[in-house]
Image: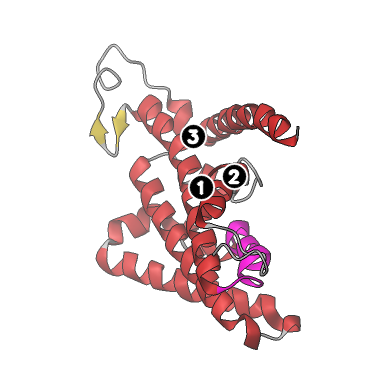
Amino acid sequence: MNGAGGGQKSVKALAMEGLWTNNPIFGQVLGICSTLAVTNMVMNTLVMCAALVVTLSMSSLSISLLRSWTPRNIRMMIETLIIAFYVIMVDIALKAYWPEMSQNLGPYVGLIITNCIVMGRAEACANTQPPLTALVDGFFNGLGYSFMLLLVAIPRELLGMGTIMGFAAPYFSGPHWDKWIIMVMPPGAFFMLALAVWLFRSIQGPQQKEGAK
């Protein structure tokens, strides 16, 4: 994946872009709806993250494998069908083996079909790069998304409910801690996301200036 002639990037470069330099959430500001919707509980967030990583990785791989046979004028419809196939598989698996979690997540697993991150990687990478590059790109962009969702979810559940993954957390679950109910409400999601984006962009700024010198 290091071939310079084909413009391919190394695994390390793809990992750095997906996790840090071009992170889907604080770099590209994509996928914000799910960031705000499912991050009130860490377990819900983990399942949502796993669903997106699987969908993003496998759809990127499939779109790349089919890119030579896909007519350009209908490519977005085909990409949507491929993405929908993997999302439906994940949704069916959840309903069959973990119906309680499927009910907790409600429509948000199905809405991965319309997630800008998935379509964005299909258009930006999978349509032009070989299958392995597309798979790695999708995987690390999914991990970058997951990293940010968990960063928002952990303090929300801890401060708002006094638990982590449903288990009582020391100090935060005792009578001396007054739960911040606002943290498990929509304003808490906006607040935590804004803090996370501000923090990482503040760190990135000096690094980008240093790299440009």
Q: Give the residue at x 61% y 40%.
A: 26
The circle drawn on residue 185 is: 3
Label the magenta part by its dominant secondary structure. Answer: helix
N-terminal of the pair, mark 1 or mark 2, is 2
User: Which secondary structure lies at badge 2?
Assistant: loop
The circle drawn on residue 213 is: none
- Toward the viewer: 53 or 176? 53
Question: Which segment is the magenta one?
Answer: 115-130
Alpha carbon separation for disc pair 1 and 2: 8 Å
Q: Give the residue at x 53% y 30%.
A: 192
Count of numbered circles in the view: 3
Q: Judge depth for marks 3 and 1 and give the one in front.
A: 1
Circle 1 residue: 144
User: Which secondary structure lies at badge 3?
Assistant: loop
User: Which secondary structure lies at badge 1?
Assistant: helix
Tell me the amino acid under the disc marked 3.
Answer: Met
**Vertical order, 133 against 63 (above or below):** above
Mark 2 surroundings: few (<14), some (14-19) or many (≥20) residues within 10 A: many
- Toward the viewer: 161 or 202? 202
Q: Give the residue at x 29% y 31%.
A: 163
Q: Position of residue 102 (x, y in %)?
A: 35, 59
**Vertical order, 103 against 208 (above or below):** below
N-terminal of the pair, mark 3 or mark 1, is 1
Alpha carbon separation for disc pair 2 and 3: 20 Å
Tell me the amino acid under the disc marked 1.
Answer: Gly
